[in-house]
Amino acid sequence: MYSATKNPLSILKHTYGYDQFRGQQAEIIEHLVAGGSSFVLMPTGSGKSLCYQIPALCREGVGVIVSPLIALMQDQITALAQWGIAAGAINSGMSHSNVFQVKQKLESNQLDLLYVAPERLVMPEFLDLLDTVNIALFAIDEAHCVSQWGHDFRPDYTALSFLAERFKGIPRIALTATADRATRKDIIERLKLEKGKTFIGGFDRPNIHYSIVERNNPKKQVHDFIVNNHAGDSGIIYCISRKKVDDMADWLQKKGINALPYHAGMSAEARSANQDLFLREDNIIMVATIAFGMGIDKPDVRYVAHMNIPKSIEAYYQETGRAGRDGLPSNAFMIFGMDDAAMQRSWIENSEAAEIQKRIEHQKLNALLGLCEAAICRRQVLLEYFDDTGEPCGNCDTCDAKPETFDGTIPAQMALSAVYRTGQRFGMVYVVDVLIGKEDDRIIRFGHDQQSTFGIGKESSKPEWQNVFRQLVSRNLLRVDVNEHNGIKITDKGFAFLKKKESIHFRKITEKAKESKKKNSRRTKVALDLDEDKSLYENLKSARQKMAKTRRVPAYVIFHDKTLIELAKAKPQSLDEMLEINGIGESKLKKFGQTLLDVILAS
Ligand code: ADP
Ligand code: ZN
């Protein structure tokens, strides 16, 4: 156990091996050490865990961390053990004897941190147990789960409001990486944190390069993206359905790429085996539904690719946020098409949710579609969504090559009127055929070749019309009625657009845009900037891999790539010098220092 006299900065240095606090860490920690409660919203990878771990080490007693991520608790505990921190977990996945052991440690004051799932925390017998020990603080991780406005509501979490009453005087800290304004307010109210302090770090993840492209050949698009930018890297590919996951993983494997599937339809064993491989090996690609990723804190995921759009900007932000936690350059790459939006809409419509909930979800989806179609900096759109601001970033596809726009007023009017005249019941392909004047049997049979809209759009190509329709759908002037064979209908906003003779601008899809996309992908290649130290870096990596294998932990639990890069560049000649390197604290130095020093001295 750490003595109460230890101060936060010395714990940061000696235990974690880091030089200085980042962002608001120092303030948050100081507030908590002094007994204050708080709500913390900071992006993934910004170092939220230290905000409760260090106060728990400074204060008397055990820090209780509430987390929904039972499957990952053991990994967290093993990682903490490498820093020399004593942590335990109690959850429903454990055997009685394991629980008994942890309880004993807890009662004999041997634990710095205790991880529990919310449903366990609220059990009367567990609360009785807590009454018998000294508690340093409560940390409520993934706090957005408490709010219905958030994107991952968990009813178990709402019960946590009782902590304020039952454990008066014990500081509480709620943490999340994603919450829009309404969600924030809700979290603070539900967890009774009104009297606490709120810390909002920016949302920006400057090391992530964002790009979003229109779908034409999804598998190939993602494959090319990987081959051009990320050969040998760890990455995550998100697909919308289990079937698509299996299909894509299979296809990539046939292409000789190390891809593994992950979705809720697989057996628990198969899933956890794949997750383990992903965490432990260096170059695995996880092809997954969104069932995968919550709480995965593998720091060296170099990219997240979306084959389909997620349901909201929060979800996109959280999923892409799994890339580059170590701060090294990383990519978020997404392809999107209109059928995705239609699928998401149908899920919302056909869900059991209350009308108001559905309305919220439609709005969230609209915001995401706005991001996909944005002609301005993607990061600005993202940040604005969270009430954050920034200049055009220079690190996204629209900054790399500003998309051309065109006045789409006339094409939009033509499209809407063709939809109207064909009776608002045909799909996009059909209406586009009418616009370009295709002599199609069905069109003739329905007499649509006799209407004034037949062929009025023949100056434009099919893909150009598809682009117009997609943007009309994403701006909510048209909607796809999934309950009626994907027939296209005009929305109220669409009728108002016609009536008020409004104007509209669209993004162009041009050959030029396609070319510059290629150029960008080269630019986004992750460069580690090692030059002549590259071979030493590789040797350090394989030494790390061996130590990780012996200890049965992922390589990054030993050291992050960032630490190895620093080692390869600085080449410390003694253990003392090694302590200067970021990420090497006393416990890790003792465990791994000599092995790595030998590698450096032999080079
Ligand atoms: P979050 O929970 O906010 O996603 P983590 O707590 O997992 O982020 O931190 C991300 C990484 O940054 C971790 O490897 C952590 O050890 C490291 N880190 C945290 N604080 C600092 C710091 N002050 N200096 C250097 N590295 C840090
Ligand atoms: Zn940008």
Image (tube, rainbow, N blue to C red):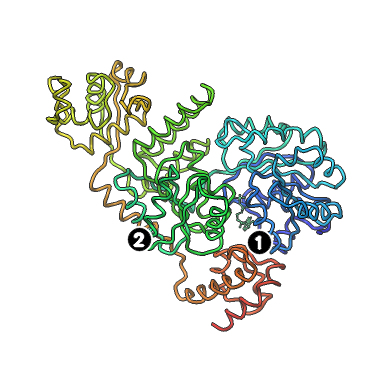
Percent from the top left, x then y, of residue 173? 71, 42
Rounded to the nearest angstrom, the CA distance separating label 2 from label 1 is 41 Å
Q: Mark 1 is on which residue type?
A: Tyr
Residue 124 lies in quadrant:
top right
Percent from the top left, x then y, of residue 259? 44, 58
Q: Mark 2 is on which residue type?
A: Lys
Percent from the top left, x then y, of residue 229? 38, 59
Residues at badges 2 and 1 in contact (C-beta under 8 Å)?
Answer: no
Of pointers 2 and 1, the one earlier in the residue sequence: 1
Q: Is residue 32 above or below residue 539?
A: above
Instruction: Please name whichever residue, 72 or 147, is drawn nearer the observer in this view of the structure.
Output: 72
Instruction: Please name whichever residue, 442 or 56, is drawn nearer the observer in this view of the structure.
Output: 442
Q: Given the current orientation, which residue lies at the most extreme bottom position?
A: 602
- The residue beneath circle 1 is 18
Q: Is mark 1 within 8 Å of ligand 1?
A: yes
Task: Say which mark, if any, is on residue 223.
Answer: none
Residue 562 lies in quadrant:
bottom right
- The residue beneath circle 2 is 255
- Give the number of the mark in front: 2 or 1: 2
Instruction: Please name whichever residue, 21 or 526, is drawn nearer the observer in this view of the structure.
Output: 526
Label 1: state its secondary structure: loop
Tell me what residue is drawn at x 67 percent, y 35 percent: 156
Tell me what residue is drawn at x 39 percent, y 48 percent: 211
On-image quarter of the N terminus = bottom right
Label 2: state its secondary structure: loop
Q: Given the current orientation, which residue lies at the most extreme front position?
A: 267
